[in-house]
Amino acid sequence: MTVPQPDLQPARSSRAQDRGPLVLALPKGRILKAVTPLLDKAGMAPSADCLGDDSRKLRFPTQNPMLDVVRVRSFDVATFVASGGAHVGICGADVLMEFDYPEIYAPLDLGIGYCRVSVAQPADLLHDPKEWARWSEVRVATKYPAITRRFFAARGINANIVHLHGAMELAPMLGLSRLIVDLVDTGSTLRANGLREVETITHITSRLIVNRTALKTRPEDIGAIINSVRSALETFPPAAEKTKAKQSS
């Protein structure tokens, strides 16, 4: 099912597409902290106030005088890059899968921010795949309506979506839905709220993303960013993340 996309202006009309500094959109939270050592190795770490919670600024300089960072919500990174508000960005593959912007090119898997998009249900309910095969519809709470609909549609089930932006775990408890689809890392939040993971939809890592028009209009500048991050990755093996991914696969 096609998900309506925001009305994006052509990237070339954005102020970010002029010959000033490139703009890198970074997500707030754990991915920002995880990616900072990699950006440091690549010579583009943001200023210290970008990493703290005290600053109310949203745009910051970096080690590279021709690159600025903007700090935004994780779900907004792809929209900023797709619309041309930023030239490049870092976001989870879950965001790319949910919005599927054609304006975005994702050249590098950074191998950090490992987690998974999963289906969970109350722990006291049995999970029987044969029962799922008999369903024609199921009510699901999620912030991933597109991913969720595709997953259940592939099983011949219509997903009736309760679209939430947080606290998905409350939905089964309060009778809003039978299932939830959400990001899972350790699963501790699910367990604390009487839920358990029953199906893994996809494994997630963070990606470097690029605005396709910016890549055409400023190929040398964008190419230098991609190459710097690629080189940094060669000496920045996120061993813990890779081990975790293998154990969970």
Image (tube, helix red, strand yellow):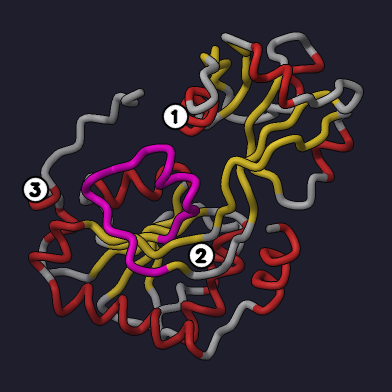
Q: Amino acid at mark 3?
A: Ser
Residue at position x 23%, y 45% in the image: 102
- Residue 53 picture location, percent across and down: 62, 56
Amino acid type at circle 2 is: Cys
Q: Quadrant of residue 171?
A: top right
Q: Which residues are magenta?
A: 90-108
Does residue 121 lie above or below 16 as drawn? Answer: above
| Identity, as a three-letter code, of the amino acid under mark 1 | Ala
For label 3, the SS is helix
Q: Measured along the vertical axis of the image, is residue 14 above or below residue 176?
A: below
Picture quarter with the N terminus: top left
In the image, residue 16 sits, relative to residue 96, either above or below, namely below
- Would residue 105 be counted in the magenta stretch? yes
Q: Nearer the viewer, mark 2 or mark 3?
A: 3
Q: Is residue 70 magenta?
A: no
**Horizontal arrangement in the rendering, residue 103 relative to residue 207 (left or right):** left
Where is residue 218, by image quadrant?
bottom left
Q: Mark 1 or mark 2: name the one nearer the start of the chain.
A: 2
Q: Which residue is mark 2?
A: 50
- Which of these two is toward me, 119 or 40? 119
Q: What is the crowding at mark 1: few (fewer than 14 residues within 10 Å), some, or many (at least 20)?
A: some
Q: Name which of mark 1 and mark 3 comes first in the sequence.
A: 3
Q: Residue furthest right?
A: 124
196 relative position to 114: left or right: right
Crowd class of label 3 (few under 14; some 14 to 19; many from 20; radius 10 Å):
few
Residue at the disc numbered 3: 13
Alpha carbon of mark 2 to alpha carbon of mark 3: how far? 27 Å
Which circle marks residue 146 in the picture? 1
